[in-house]
Image: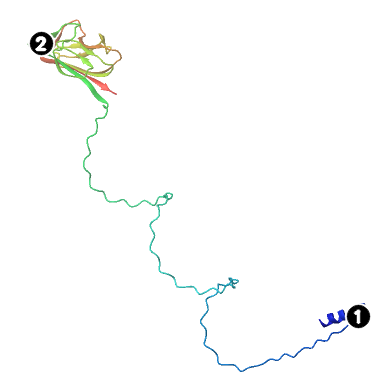
């Protein structure tokens, strides 16, 4: 400040060359120091001022010590069942257990299909109630006088008759026995034709018997027992001829 004043004064002198200096009398400052009196009583507390602006956050303090573990809370409700996992490999086979008690018998099942065997059969005979001999004319069939059994629909026979009719195709077993008194020859015929190239023969006092299987491809087919000779055949009286036919099921 002094230098500035000095420079201004110098400049005035240079410009005006002449300057009037005015004197100012400055009175000294008098400070009167009195005697301090006793302190008065404390005044009532003033009203709380308005909150000041929030200060700048301080630096983060050090992490405190870990607190004690709290008491476990109650178990929550069960969650939904998850999807089934993949099937694991089969374990080793266990030991065989003891045999348990037998269970109650089950209900009877339905009847199964018919198996192989006999489905239809016929049995016929000839009986002569007279005395002496029963004569069969030459080249004539034996007449059957009675039926022992006729099961199924494969056969037709009404006594007295020399002819048996087969109504179904298939294979048939024919079994016959003739009790003749003298030598005799007989043919088993199918539709009038012998089934063997030579007749069946029986000597005196012995029966003529045979078993034959035939195959019937067309129906109706007739069966007869025929005296193969031109001379009469002499049979025993009473029951002297039987013939049985069985239909074979494959």
**Left or right of 241 on screen, residue 11:** right
- Residue occupying image coordinates x 92% and y 77%: 15
**First in sequence: mark 2 vs mark 1:** 1
- Is the C-beta separation of discs 2 and 1 under 8 Å? no
Farthest bottom residue in view:
35
Instruction: Please tell me in which quadrant of the rendered image residue 127 appears.
Output: top left
- Residue occupying image coordinates x 21% and y 15%: 155
Residue 56 placement (x, y as % from top left): 60, 71
Residue 191 placement (x, y as % from top left): 26, 9
145 to 5, vertically: above or below: above
132 to 117, vertically: above or below: above
Residue 27 placement (x, y as % from top left): 75, 90
Farthest left residue in view:
131
> What residue is shown with label 1?
13
Residue 83 placement (x, y as % from top left): 42, 49
| Mark 1 nearby-residue class (10 Å; few <14, some 14–19, many ≥20) | few
- The colour scheme applied to this rendered structure is rainbow
- Looking at the image, which is closer to me, 202 or 98? 98
Element type where label 2 sits in the image: strand
Element type where label 1 sits in the image: helix
Instruction: Please tell me in which quadrant of the rendered image residue 14 appears.
Output: bottom right
Kindly report the distance in space between the C-alpha atoms of the residues bearing marks 2 and 1: 206 Å
186 to 152, vertically: above or below: above
**Left or right of 224 on screen, residue 237:** left
Looking at the rendered structure, the number of numbered marks drawn on it comes to 2
Which quadrant of the figure contains the N terminus?
Answer: bottom right
Q: Which mark is residue 133?
A: 2
| Mark 2 nearby-residue class (10 Å; few <14, some 14–19, many ≥20) | some
- Looking at the image, which is closer to me, 54 or 140? 54
Which quadrant of the figure contains the C terminus?
Answer: top left
203 to 76, vertically: above or below: above
């Amino acid at each position: 400040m002094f230098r500035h004043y000095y420079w201004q004064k110098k400049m005035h002198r240079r410009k005006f060359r002449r300057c009037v200096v005015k004197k100012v009398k400055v009175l000294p400052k008098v400070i009167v120091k009195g005697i301090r009196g006793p302190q008065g009583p404390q005044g009532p507390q003033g009203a709380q001022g308005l909150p000041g602006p929030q200060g700048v956050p301080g630096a983060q303090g050090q992490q405190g010590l870990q607190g004690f573990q709290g008491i476990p809370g109650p178990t929550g409700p069960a969650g939904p069942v998850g999807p089934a996992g993949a099937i694991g490999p089969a374990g080793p086979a266990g030991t065989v257990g003891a045999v348990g008690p037998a269970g109650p018998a089950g209900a009877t099942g339905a009847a199964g299909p018919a198996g192989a065997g006999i489905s239809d059969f016929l049995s016929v005979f000839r009986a002569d109630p007279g005395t002496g001999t029963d004569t069969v004319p030459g080249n004539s069939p034996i007449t059957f006088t009675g039926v022992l059994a006729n099961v199924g629909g494969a056969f037709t026979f009404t006594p007295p008759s020399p002819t048996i009719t087969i109504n179904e195709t298939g294979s048939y077993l024919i079994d016959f026995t003739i009790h003749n008194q003298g030598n005799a020859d007989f043919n088993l015929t199918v539709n009038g034709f012998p089934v063997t190239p030579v007749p069946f023969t029986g000597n005196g006092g012995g029966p003529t018997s045979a078993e034959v299987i035939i195959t019937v491809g067309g129906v109706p087919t007739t069966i007869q027992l025929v005296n193969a000779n031109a001379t009469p055949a002499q049979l025993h009286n009473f029951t002297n001829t039987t013939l049985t036919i069985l239909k074979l099921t494959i």
